[in-house]
Image: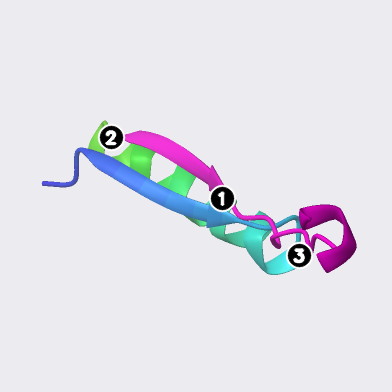
């Protein structure tokens, strides 16, 4: 039995579809859905690190 579903998201169309699928699966199994927002790390210019 599924109790928790983790969905990594990044704002893409595919992530939106993954959320819909996870919600459907959660409803069928009485599970909870947890979203993990993925972001691209910022690049800090070397001049600012000194």
Which label's residue is closer to the chain start, 1 or 2?
1
Which label's residue is closer to the chain start, 2 or 3?
3
For the residues labelled 1 and 2, the Cα–Cα distance comes to 13 Å
Residue span colored magenta = 31-50
Residue 2, magenta (yes or no): no
Q: Tag 1's secondary structure?
A: helix
**For the point 75% across and 55% down, which residue is it?**
11
Residue 40, magenta (yes or no): yes
**For the point 47% across and 52% down, which residue is it?**
7
Q: From the image, which quarter does the C terminus lie in?
A: bottom right
7 left or right, relative to 1: right
Note whether 6 is above or below 18 in the view shown: above
Q: Residues within 10 Å of mark 1 (few under 14, many from 20)?
A: some
The image position of residue 45, as x and y in percent, is 86, 64
Q: Which residue is mark 2?
A: 31
Farthest residue in the front direction?
50
On the image, which quarter does residue 17 sit in? bottom right
As rendered, which of 5 and 40 lies closer to the eye?
Answer: 40
Q: Please say whether residue 19 is visible from this viewpoint.
A: yes
The image position of residue 43, as x and y in percent, is 79, 64
Note whether 30 is above or below 21 in the view shown: above
**For the point 41% across and 37% down, which residue is it?**
33
Q: Please say whether residue 25 is visible from this viewpoint.
A: no
As rendered, which of 16 and 30 lies closer to the eye?
Answer: 16
């Amino acid at each position: 039995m599924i109790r928790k579903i983790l969905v990594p998201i990044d704002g893409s169309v595919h992530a939106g579809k993954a959320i819909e699928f996870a919600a459907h699966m959660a409803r069928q199994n009485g599970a909870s859905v947890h979203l993990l927002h993925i972001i691209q790390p910022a690049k800090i210019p070397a001049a600012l690190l000194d």
